[in-house]
Image (cartoon, rainbow, N blue to C red):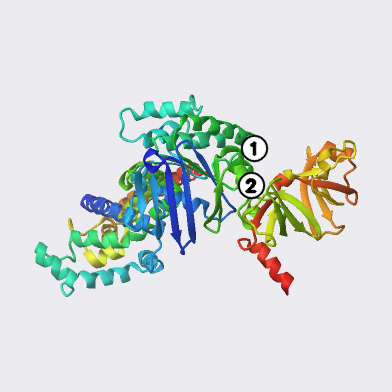
Amino acid sequence: MPDGASGALKVVLAQSAPIPLDARLEAAPGQLLALVGPSGAGKSTILRTIAGLIRTRQGRIECAGAVWFDAAAGLFEPPQRRRVGYVFQNYALFPHLSALDNVAIAVGTAARPKLRAGELLALVHLDGLEHRRPAELSGGQQQRVAVARALARDPAVLLLDEPFSAVDQVTRRKLHRELAQLRRQLNLPIVLVTHDLEEAAGLADRMCILHHGHTLQSGAPAEVMNRPASAEVARLVDLPNVFDGEVVAHDAALRRTHLRWRGRTLEALHAPAFESGARVTWVIPAAGIVLHRRDRPSRGERENPIAGIVGECLRLGEMTAVTQFVDGNGATKLAFSIPSHVADRNGIAPGAGITVSLLSEAIHLMSRERSTAASERREADED
Amino acid sequence: MDWSAFRLSLELAFWTCGLLLPVGILVGRALAWRTFPGKVFVEALIALPLVLPPTVLGFYLLIGFGKASWAGQAYEAVIGEPLVFSFAGLVIASMIFNLPFVVQPMQRAFAAVDPTIREAAWCCGLSRWRAFLRIEAPLAWPGILSALVLTFAHTLGEFGVVLMVGGNIPDETRTVAIAIYDRVQAFDDQAAGAMAAVLLLFSFAAIGLVNLLSLRVGRRHA
């Protein structure tokens, strides 16, 4: 991990009021960090704090070796003195200025600001529309002006607050590609706020899950989405298959941990951190559930086979979302997706008997104490 | 036609507008963007001249500026002449009774500027002063201008407060509204009619201009 002097952004924030915050995040130059969480999780608040629009009670913000905020030392730089490029949620373009002037005004006192502004507009593929006002531009074009304006200050960090939420899907995909291209040309940390998990997973190098102002887990998107640190994170990254179980034994040689779940013994990826007998919460991403196909049986079917009946079957275009009732009732459900043609060929319909395999590699164990949902359930069991 | 009364009215209106412009911007902007304890009270106080009979306002100003008051005494000690029944007294009274006409449209104009646009300006590196000059003021200017036009027209037409505080002294406090009253009292209907017609035309033009400006604002924010 590069240190602060090389351009990284390091943020530590804490306060209990007015908005509770307990956040810790880091992004290296060239890295795109996605800040993900439901509405009201404090995502925008954190961006505004980095920009200097909000001052928290405690914390420290450091970027590219410069300290912007240090509550302990009583240091607080105003937004004007922080080299931030901020793309606001609704872009907040200056309505009375042309696209060119919107960018030029942020270039500052450098010589020939309009020339630089023109270059930046060309960088975001807006050359030719320099003299239009924001109201005369489409949503996607406005977003590009906002990005050019954010870059005009030669920022040390780029902050993007839900920059794709105000455009239609086709434009969004295009802008996603453009951002992916643009970031290769910029060697600075980028923080992207989004509530769209797919967007975060597709664009980010690192993902940080935020809930009620707390950063719950940071890591590579695949890591966070497949191996959540807690049941709460599992719920926030939309993992439906979260269950309680008990560690039976470890098999270090085969790199497996045996897990007791509803009268079955499952083979999970080796998780030596949990002692035998430990009660755990475990999760399996939908992609780790494999349907046994009637037309094509395979050797993988011996891996944690689970029989049940189809509870729900919802066709969503090319994919079909299937809910399997384990043990014949709706109390325990496994959710996964299969291509619709596979669903057709295997006669997947409510009431049909099916068997699936839970891939051992995909079963992820979490300590139970950290999960509020699981502890609530346990309390209910004890009653 | 009493041209000196016209000249005096115009001078009074210019002074009032010029002095109220910074006051209106500061107060209107603060009321638009800030919340502070007692804000409702301040807003009510500013709106008071809209509903108070001019004679009541004039009466209190006469008492407040008079020789018995600390303001009147302080003014006389510094300037050497009394505040009441003088042009300076008239300007101060005019500023007070025009406060709602200048503050309220400016408050509305600044409130219509999206606060995130102001924050975007700061994040673009613009100092608060440059953000005001380049972003806030251009966006709010139709409101600022219409406030000034309203104030100008209102000052030309004000009668009650002027009569109470300034009296009817030619070249000092006899504004055109007072002059019209004076002419009617003297059965000089022709002079009164001419001055009334000029005032009518001017007021009509002023209201038309204000409406035109608010249309412009409406289009911009559409």
Numbered mark located on residue A225 in the image: 2
**Chain letter, disc 2 residue:** A
Check disc 2 and give the amino acid type: Met
Check disc 1 and give the amino acid type: Gln
Question: Left or right of A261: which side holds A118?
Answer: left
Q: In this view of the protein, which residue sits in the foreground, B53 or A268?
A: A268
* Residue displayed at 83% across by 55% down: A326
View extreme (top): residue: A128
Q: Quadrant of residue B127?
A: top left
Q: Are marks 2 and 1 on the same chain?
A: yes
View extreme (front): residue: A253
Image height of A231 relative to A305, above or below? below
Question: Left or right of A140: which side holds A234?
Answer: right
Q: Quadrant of residue B102?
A: bottom left
**Chain letter, disc 1 residue:** A
Image height of A98 relative to A219, above or below? above
Q: In this view of the protein, which residue sits in the foreground, A224 or A182?
A: A224
* Residue displayed at 67% across by 67% down: A376
Mark 2 or 1, nearer chain start? 1
Q: CA distance from mark 2 to mark 1?
A: 23 Å
Answer yes or no: is residue A320 visible.
no
Q: Position of residue A145 (x, y in %)?
A: 48, 34
Q: Look at mark 1 in the image and give the residue it sits on.
A: A169
Numbered mark located on residue A77 in the image: none
